[in-house]
Image (cartoon, rainbow, N blue to C red):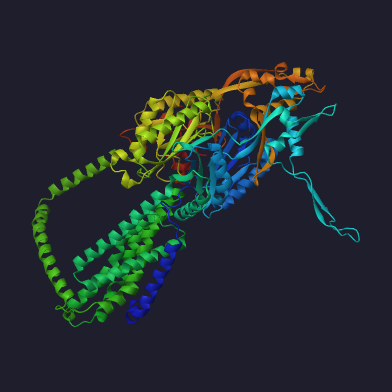
Amino acid sequence: MSRIFIDRPIFAWVIAIIIMLFGVAGITSLPVQQFPDIAPPQVNINATYPGANAATLESSVTQIIEQQLTGLDGLLYFSSTSSSSGQVSINATFAKGTNPDIAQVQVQNKVSQAMSRLPSTVQQQGVRVTKANPDFLMIVAVSDTYDRTTNIDVSDFLVSRLQEPIGRIPGVGQTNVYGAQYAMRIWLDPVKMAAFQLMPSDVVNALTAQNTDVAAGEIGAVPSPQGQRLDATVTAQSRLSKPEEFAQIVLKTTSSGASVRLTDVARIELGAESYGIVSRVNGHPGAGLSVSLSPGADALETAKLVKAEFARQAKSFPQGYTYAFANDSTTFITKSVNDVVETLFEAIILVVIVMFVFLQSWRATLIPAIAVPVVLLGTFAIFAVAGYSINTLTMFGLVLAIGLLVDDAIVVVENVERLMAENPGMSPREATIESMREISVALIAIALVLSAVFLPMAFFGGSTGVIYRQFSLTIVSAMALSVVVALVLSPALTTTILKRPEDEDATSLIGRASHHMREWFERNFAKLINWYHPKATWAAQRKTIPLIAYGIMMVALVVLFMRLPTGFLPSEDQGMAQLSFQLPAGATLERTQAAQLAVEQYFLKNEKQNIDTLLTVAGGGGGGGNSQNAGRGFISLTDWDSRKGETNSADAITKRATMALSGGYRDLEFYALQPPVVRGLGQSTGFTAEVLNISGLSAEDFGKLRDTILAEARTLPQLANVRLSTLPDQPTLKINTDTQALSTLGVSAADVNATLTTAWGGRYVNDFVDRGRVKRVYVMGDAPYRSRPEDLAIWQVRNTAGKMVPFSAFSSASWAKAPNASSRFSGTPNFEYSGQAGPGYSSGDAMNAFEALVAQHPEVSLAILSGAPLLGSGPAALCGLADRGLPVPCRAV
């Protein structure tokens, strides 16, 4: 075959150029990522039930939806969380390779089947089914540096002006605002309502009837009478837009003709949808917008578009408003990929230098040097066909492949030069023809042998297979192309570029330089051989000594292999950190805000030189949604060049903060964590474990065992920063209703429940128009009338006789302890633990220690440990590190 291209070198060049053109097209179209898309696709289900506690949510919403999640193609497992803030979150994880769009449609269909069984309030709020990357692409923090507005004002600005434009950018999968937009808040006064014999349901009915758009039609609509000369649209009642308009809503008309209006029984204001989150940015009121990448999107290109949109919108920001990036994964991605690209070019330069040194001819060096860009560009074309991305693994594969791909071209060149040296008078063309006849089969055989080494990795399953598959096929593709180039282009080049030794111009500048360099290299290389030969001879004559040395090295290898830390990938300074802080159960948002200020002050004072942007969120932390006693934060560190030394690394910063804030503030549990090495597999470095209640323990007994395992884990040296990812139990006021008393007093149980739900839990009624944007209307009891258990007696319900009956006449209250949030794993109650490896131990040691600890408690089972089920394949992978003969085998889901 090579004879065709020896006789037609232009044809060979055309093929090489076509390969390179396809490669250039591939480079321009390929997405750029730090790693391949390793995390399996996930579909999120979110619902809201205002005022409901965790137990009520689990029984009335979570389990109903969970029971429908059967028969989904590729479903690995699902996890759910029901929080006391009235939020349900169900996350369904699918096998790697599942089409996320199809998965979302299937989940949406299953949820639709359960909608009729959900509470009406949940149906009114809506159940949202979204597909999203489980990790943030970036978090953009907007703040008022003049401190003239509140975080609610900033949040509304972010939702109204920026969330939707950012969400429409190609590549953006999901957006979420740490805050809430404006809402019309109607705060009820139970004393005034009782005076007018009104209940919260009367207010809700009036709002529903009088705050609505009426489709009144038109005058003269066809068909119309003969001779109709007027056609006009008829407008009637429309949605209200101002607090003053809501204040005039008529609730009741008395027999004397007087009207009771909404302003007579309630305080009306333009407030916020939710008051449970308070965000601050670098010490100023602010809010954050998290942006998640859609599956398969180009991270760098999407981030570029998001930044461009913010830069465009910033021109019309209110005075004092500014934005910054509290979390930007693309900065580290860019740095990682650029470092590997630099290494790639350095490797190419080193390979060319080594070839020139040993081949000792610029003509001979030029041939394999030309083969390198052809093969590399061709490999990028294969990436595009295979659906790969430009990432650190594929680029690392190319770096390793460079040393292999030039071998084929070097073999061709050296064999041609050998034939010309051994056969004086043989032309380069004749030598090339003879050389290819001798080595063509050998070149193909070399490629097949080396491919047999790397190709099996391409058949690994699961997310781990994604890593090895791309690495494997990168090397195999490069080697296959190098053989093609060696059979097609290299023979054409040797025919036209190489010359016979006697035809070399030794008088030219290049010829003289090559001659001198050849003499110098051969002279020094001969000295090296002369030095090495007697040593090798001495070792060959005394075989025992080399064998003993070999044995010592093997023993040392085994010892080091057993003692060195183990881990999936090494932890790196990604220029970011995450914060988690929590106060005891029952702590109010006011106390959490004080802790938020303490955390903020520490970083802005003690780590000011290392901090670029600090976003803290009070009331938005914990593992079960928002809670008043928990918070979280995001830190963007300054550039690596300005953080010289180990003391300014992300690891050192987070460790200092954890030590200072955990012990320096009363009742504050604080952790500063680095993001996971592989984005999307967990929320931070370390391990995450799901412990399942497989023996049917009661909630109380399971909670006691949870605390026992936590206490035992904190005593193990292999573990550090062990914590529960779910929020602790909190005090709960249980209201007991006497049904007999209700019947005697003529009070409807439905009215009692509606009053309680609306007054203490709050109710979304309908919408209003605020500056051209539709927002929500909420009715709730005013704060002074729902702040103490005794306030329940203030609220009254109207009986069948039209008399007002206080709650104290038919109900009583008692204190209990209930979960702040309840979580389930594939339908089984569970608790989630997180932690890091202790000093001197690896992540593998930490996971092994926790696995052994759980095995000591036969009442529970370990269902998932860290990211192992996401990385593995098959049922055994769902057991975390798979069953290793523990007393209680991990439970495959």
Q: Is residue 171 left or right of residue 356?
A: right
Residue 510 lies, with reference to residue 793, above or below; the image says below
Q: Which residue lies at the image location 35% right of the left edge and 68% below the top edge?
A: 374
- Tell me the quarter of the image containing the N terminus: bottom left
* Front-lying residue, 732 or 436: 732
Horizontally, is 711 left or right of 429 in the view?
right
Residue 364 rendering spot, x and y as whole percentages: 23, 72
Residue at left offset 61%, top offset 50%: 105
Figure quadrant of residue 819: top right
Where is residue 502 shown, x and y percent of the image?
16, 80
The tally of labels here is 0
- The x and y percentages for residue 865 are 44, 37
Where, by quadrant of the figure, is residue 827 drawn?
A: top right
Left of 160 or right of it: where is 560? left
Residue drawn at (34%, 67%) of the image:
373
Looking at the picture, tell me which residue is in the foreground, 411 or 84: 84
Q: Report if residue 425 is visible in the image.
A: yes
Residue 836 in view, yes or no: no
In this view, the residue in front, 374 or 621, is 621
Q: Is residue 558 left or right of residue 731?
A: left
Q: Nearer the viewer, residue 234 or 533?
A: 234
Task: State the image coordinates of residue 468 (x, y, percent, origin top left).
Answer: 40, 52
